Image: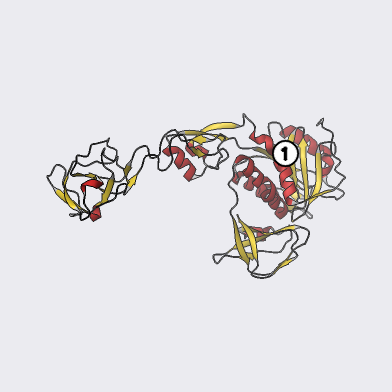
């Protein structure tokens, strides 16, 4: 058993949403410790987060190049009224540096290296004629006056060598991976994904696909949370459904928690007579408390044999909201992955009421006109309404009612 003196789970503490999120962050802070990283090829790092700052090893672009198909010139060679210049040999993309002779114009392709001595590019459509001559042909082209620096991408104009390219903790999406590839990096150091042991509890709960006897319900929580965690980049191990026997639950945890970074359970955390998780954690450093949130108020937090533990409520919407309000944003803040839920302002399509002392989280559909339609009521069992939602609607503590058209914060799922 955990040698740390346990906190008495019979004492019911109360926390705000922010306070409990901070407690979860403190619990999971070791996930950022050294040795919890790995080096991966860029594409394998998609969705992960940088473990270290990355500084640019070179200028990007590495050389001055043309922004347009056109003619590279010395701006001083063309007077205000324009002039004719002799066409020199072209510079294709990928070719090395050439030298621009005075009084000449060099055909140049987009991205090609600027010739030495050239300080501007005239787009092909501004030239007369507005086409390139055949290679090797003697030709003249009339060009307008063009200021120095026009249509030139300077070396290091995107990022200069030595500058901070991406900070540790940055979530790696396509844009970030594209930058690293552009800097010549083939692989990158990222945080390793957390390994989570997920346990569903309850004698009344049955695995989907099995016969459903009277008084039983199918387990939605296991699939709901496992899918949420996998989508967030966690490695999830499920044990099947635990019975309401505390000793059996303890044995199950001991058998499967070794090597895990976190244990998450659903159910058995309220104040009823048969709350198996509370009973199983009686001699461990686990606290059971109430967060001022609807749904998802009852929560458990602590450690089991040194492994961080979070106990979520048993109703499907409650456990999903608990994940979205606590575990997911904490992983984002600590590891940079998963990406934060987009938060937008929306107008309520209908009025609502809320317990004034609680932060209410409603399910809704964010619509194209910037409004949000509530799906179902506030009850924590309405998984059908959850399945038809694409957003979480936040009603902060201290708000008892909101009228139709009131502005609310919405997290896009």
Which residue bears the numbered disc 1? Answer: 27
Viewer-closest of 128 and 188? 128
Residue 223 in picture, x, y percent from top left: 66, 48
Q: Is residue 104 above or below residue 318?
A: above
**Disc 1 residue crowd, few under 14, some 14–19, many 20+, Cα 10 Å:** some
Identify the image quadrant of residue 350: bottom right
Identified at 56% across, 39% down, the residue is 49
Instruction: Specify whether residue 275 is in view.
Output: yes
Query: In which quadrant will I find the N terminus?
Result: top right
Residue 279 in picture, x, y percent from top left: 84, 42
Q: Is residue 266 above or below residue 255?
A: below
Is disc 1 placed on a helix, strand or loop? Answer: helix
Identified at 66% across, 35% down, the residue is 31
User: Is 67 positioned to the left or the right of 220 in the image?
Assistant: left
User: How many tags in the picture?
Assistant: 1
Identified at 81% across, 45% down, the residue is 288
Residue furthest out toward the left: 138
Q: Is residue 250 above or below residue 404?
A: above
User: Is 172 positioned to the left or the right of 300 in the image?
Assistant: left
Viewer-closest of 80 and 380? 80
Residue 75 in picture, x, y percent from top left: 25, 47
Identify the image quadrant of residue 260: top right
User: Is 62 positioned to the left or the right of 73 in the image?
Assistant: right
Instruction: Specify whether residue 200 is in view.
Output: no
């Amino acid at each position: 058993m955990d040698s740390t003196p346990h906190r008495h789970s019979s004492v019911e503490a109360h926390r705000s949403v922010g306070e409990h999120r901070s407690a979860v962050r403190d619990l999971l802070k070791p996930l950022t410790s050294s040795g919890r990283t790995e080096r991966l090829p860029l594409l394998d790092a998609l969705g992960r987060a940088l473990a270290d700052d990355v500084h640019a090893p070179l200028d990007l672009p590495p050389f001055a190049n043309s922004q347009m198909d056109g003619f590279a010139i010395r701006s001083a060679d063309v007077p205000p009224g324009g002039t004719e210049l002799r066409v020199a040999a072209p510079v294709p993309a990928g070719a090395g540096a050439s030298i621009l002779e005075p009084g000449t114009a060099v055909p140049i392709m987009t991205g090609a290296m600027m010739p030495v001595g050239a300080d501007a590019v005239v787009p092909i459509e501004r030239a007369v004629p507005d086409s390139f001559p055949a290679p090797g042909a003697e030709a003249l082209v009339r060009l307008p006056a063009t200021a120095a620096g026009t249509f030139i991408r300077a070396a290091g104009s995107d990022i200069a060598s030595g500058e901070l390219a991406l900070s540790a903790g940055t979530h790696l999406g396509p844009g970030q991976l594209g930058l690293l590839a552009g800097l010549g990096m083939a692989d990158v150091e990222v945080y390793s994904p957390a390994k989570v042991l997920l346990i569903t509890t309850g004698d009344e709960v049955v695995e989907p696909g099995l016969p459903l006897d009277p008084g039983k319900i199918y387990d939605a929580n296991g699939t709901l949370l496992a899918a949420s965690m996998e989508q967030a980049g966690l490695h999830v191990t499920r044990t099947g459904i635990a019975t309401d026997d505390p000793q059996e639950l303890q044995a199950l945890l001991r058998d499967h928690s070794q090597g895990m970074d976190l244990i998450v359970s659903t159910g058995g955390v309220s104040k009823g007579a048969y709350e198996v998780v509370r009973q199983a954690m009686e001699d461990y450093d686990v606290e059971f408390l109430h967060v001022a949130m609807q749904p998802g108020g009852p929560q458990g937090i602590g450690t089991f044999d040194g492994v961080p533990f979070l106990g979520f409520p048993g109703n499907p919407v409650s456990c999903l909201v608990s994940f979205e309000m606590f575990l997911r944003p904490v992983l984002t803040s600590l590891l940079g992955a998963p990406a934060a839920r987009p938060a937008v302002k929306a107008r309520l399509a209908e009025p609502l009421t809320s317990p004034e002392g609680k932060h209410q989280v409603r399910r809704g559909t964010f619509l194209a006109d910037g409004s949000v339609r509530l799906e179902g009521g506030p009850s924590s069992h309405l998984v059908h309404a959850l399945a038809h939602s694409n957003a979480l609607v936040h009603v902060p503590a201290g708000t008892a009612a909101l009228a139709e058209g009131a502005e609310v914060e919405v997290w896009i799922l």
